[in-house]
Amino acid sequence: MKYLIKNSFLVALVVSFSACEKVIDIKVQESDKKYVVEGVITNQPGGCHVYLSRTQPFNEDNNFEQISGAVITISDNGQQMVLAEIRPGVYESLALTGVPGHNYHLSVTVNNLIFTATCTMPPQVKLDTLYIAPGPFGQFQFATIAYTDLVGINKYRFVQYVNGNKDPEIFWENDEFTDGQKVIIQLDTGVDKQDDPRNINSGDQVTIEMLGIDQAVYKYWYSLQSGGGDGGGNSAAPANPVTNIKGGALGYFSAQTIDRRTVIAP
């Protein structure tokens, strides 16, 4: 008898919950399309480019509109260089090579709108060492780097490529507690499965780019990784990363130093 009573109760409970089901249609408020500026000038030849696109509505795919026909210039101490559009949405200058300590000004004019940004290229810090080593639990391999920080405020970003494929993980570092010291960091990509295509395996070619960036650009990457517009990761919902672009566009403009090292995983 107890068995029958329990099952009758469960049936009644399931029916009760089923009767309460209701389809909720969440209305997502669409925001206006915004231009996205991704501008970089480095201390290496051919390292000056700007990508110009426009955001998509929430319910559309991620094929962002590439914007042609813009007038884009970068100025250095009054010397202005116009970037050439080499394909839709991509503007470059092979003649412009950045110099650490110089202040650069970006101007983007498109459809009667003007977006500007200013960035100072920091002193260069180079990678001393790059090697591949097992992670904390020994299952997976990660790139380990070492560099000597300069005295003063320095901000860094690191970009990893495995066999030419860029890893989407965002790595950033500051010298708040390592000013002027030797720094050793393992770039943990979060890989935790053997079938993860981002695994570093024996024979893989691993390249690390070390980028010296200024405070505003550091804040952009920090807030992008954190998912909160204030850079603190405390937002209830993801927000746009903090930008140094003025005029209403999203994105960033970075005058950055760059150093690369490449190794073959053992």
Image: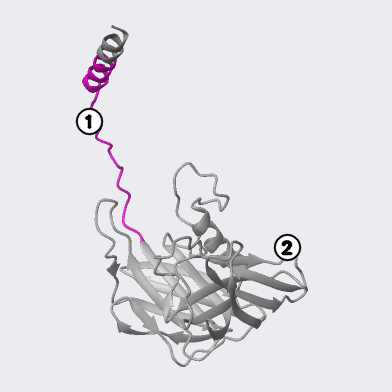
Do we see residue 78 in this rendering? Answer: no
Q: Is residue 178 left or right of residue 93?
A: right
Q: Residue at x 29, y 72 (%)?
A: 67
Residue bearing mark 2: 176
Instruction: Identify which residue is drawn at 50% across, 50% down.
Output: 228
What predominant SS class does the magenta segment belong to?
loop
Q: Secondary structure at mark 2?
A: loop
Task: Quadrant for residue 184, please give it.
Answer: bottom right
Q: CA–CA distance between discs 1 and 2?
A: 50 Å
Nearest the camera: 69 or 259? 259
Tell me which amino acid carries mark 1: Val
Find residue 164 and report its image quarter: bottom left
Q: Residue at x 57, y 71 (%)?
A: 157
Q: Which mark is residue 23?
A: 1
> Which mark, residue 258?
none
Q: Which residues are magenta?
A: 10-34
- Are discs 1 and 2 less than 8 Å apart at CB? no
Residue 218 location (% of width, % of height):
58, 65
Sequence-wise, which precedes: disc 1 or disc 2?
1
**Mark toward the viewer: 1 or 2:** 1
